[in-house]
Amino acid sequence: MFGSLGLPELLILLAIVVLIFGVNKLPKLGKGLGEGIRNFKTSVRTEDKTASDGDDQTTSKDANDS
């Protein structure tokens, strides 16, 4: 599943996370992590789109200069 981590190791990691953060903070932690991932994906898509738009504008500008 995660390389050499099996079910017992994952359960131990989950128990440690619960001990560190507490049961009440886990939903907030998950929500924050999800929002961070969503924002990262959105920014990557926006960068890809603006980069490809910039390439198109540069190409058309170069063609007009000739």
Image (spheres, rainbow, N blue to C red):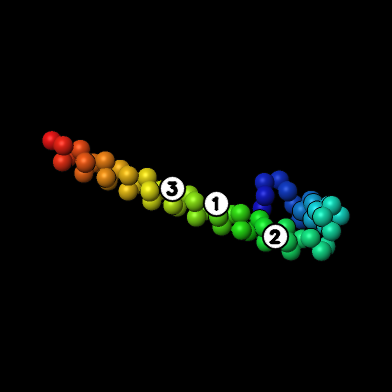
Amino acid marked by disc 3: Glu
Q: Can residue 15 be seen in this view?
A: no
Crowding at mark 1 (Cα within 10 Å: few <14, some 14-19, many 20+): few
Above or below, 32 relative to 56: below
CA separation, marks 1 and 2? Answer: 15 Å
Q: Which residue is disc 1 drawn over?
A: 40
Q: Which residue is disc 2 drawn over?
A: 30
Amino acid marked by disc 2: Gly
Residue shown at 45% from the left, 52% from the top: 45
As helix, strand or loop, the secondary structure at mark 3 comes to: helix
CA separation, marks 1 and 3? Answer: 11 Å
Find residue 24 and report its image quarter: bottom right
Q: Which of marks 2 and 3 is nearer the N terminus?
A: 2
Q: Which residue is disc 3 drawn over?
A: 47
**Residue 48 drawn at (x, y percent):** 41, 48
Q: In the picture provided, is 12 more to the left or to the right than 59?
A: right
